[in-house]
Image (cartoon, rainbow, N blue to C red):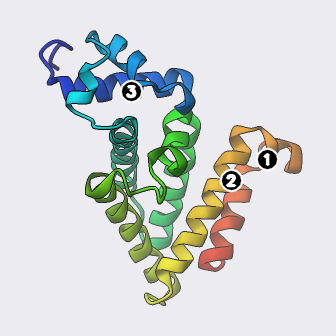
Amino acid sequence: MDSGAERPLRERLVDAGVELVLAEGSGAVGLREIARRAGVSHGAPRRYFATHRELLSAVARRGFEELAGRFAAVRGAGPRERVAGAARAYLAYAAERRGMYELMFRHDLLGSDGLEVAGPRLREATVPLFGELARLVGECTGDAGRAPVVTAALWANLHGLAQLRGWGSTGLLLGEGREEELLEAVLSAHLGVAR
C-alpha cells in the first residue's frame, strides 16, 4: 500500500475522514480536523470538495463501498439464504463500524434529500446495493413488482434492529442471546417463513 504522502491528496482527505468518523462519530467530522489528520493546511480540502457536505458524502460513499463488499462476499444456496446473509452482514457492519454506519444514513448532513449534494457518486454506491437486494427479495417472494417496497421495508426494519442493538435495547426487550431469533422474525415478516 502507498504511504500517506504518496496517495493522492483527495484520497488522503477521505481516509482521514473515515478515521475520524470511526474514532469520534459523524458529528466530529470537520474540515479543519480532517485537514490536520491528513497533514495539510486547513484550506486544502476546498481544492477537492466545494463543501463540507461533499467531503462527508465521499466518506459515506466509502462506507457504502465497504458494505457492498460484505454483501458481495455473502454465499448461500438460494435467495433467502443470501438475503439472510446480507442482513447479518448489515448488522455486523453497523456494530463494527458504528460511526461510519451512522454517517451513511445521516441525510441531514449529506444533503437535503440525502443524495442531492453527493450527486451521482454516492448514488452509484447505493443504488446497485439496494437493487441487488431487491432482486433477491423478488426471488424470495415471487413478486418482482413489489420487491423494491418490500426491500425498503426490510432495510428499514434491519436499520431499526441495528440501532436497537447498538443501544443495547434488544437484550432488555428479549433477554440476551436471542438476536438470531429476532433476525429470523424480521426476515419471516418480509419474506415469509423459511421452508
Disc number for residue 17 = 3
Count residues near mark 3 (Cα–Cα under 10 Å), then give few for <14, some for 14-19, many for 20+: many
Quick one: 137 or 166, which is closer to the camera? 166
Count residues near mark 1 (Cα–Cα under 10 Å), then give few for <14, some for 14-19, many for 20+: some
In the image, 62: left or right of 182?
Answer: left
Q: Is there CB contact under 8 Å for labels 1 and 2?
A: yes
When the figure is inspected, residue 72 is found, relative to residue 142, above or below; the finding is above
Q: CA distance from mark 1 to mark 2?
A: 8 Å
Q: Secondary structure at mark 2?
A: helix
Spot occupied by residue 76 in the image (x, y as percentages of width and height)? 42, 63
Of callouts 2 and 3, which one flags the residue occurring earlier in the amino acid sequence? Answer: 3
Visible residue check, residue 82? yes
Identified at 52% across, 72% down, the residue is 151
Of callouts 1 and 2, which one flags the residue occurring earlier in the amino acid sequence? Answer: 2
Q: Which residue type does callout 2 highlight?
A: Leu
Quadrant that contains the N terminus: top left
Visible residue check, residue 194? no
Spot occupied by residue 140 in the image (x, y as percentages of width and height)? 49, 80
Q: Secondary structure at mark 3?
A: helix
Quick one: 124 or 136, which is closer to the camera? 124
Identified at 45% across, 90% down, the residue is 145
Spot occupied by residue 60 in the image (x, y as percentages of width and height)? 40, 42
Q: CA distance from mark 3 to mark 1?
A: 31 Å
* Residue designated by label 1: 170
Q: CA distance from mark 2 to mark 3?
A: 26 Å
In the image, 190: left or right of 113?
Answer: right
Of callouts 3 and 1, which one flags the residue occurring earlier in the amino acid sequence? Answer: 3
When the figure is inspected, residue 46 is found, relative to residue 188, above or below; the finding is above
* Residue designated by label 2: 161
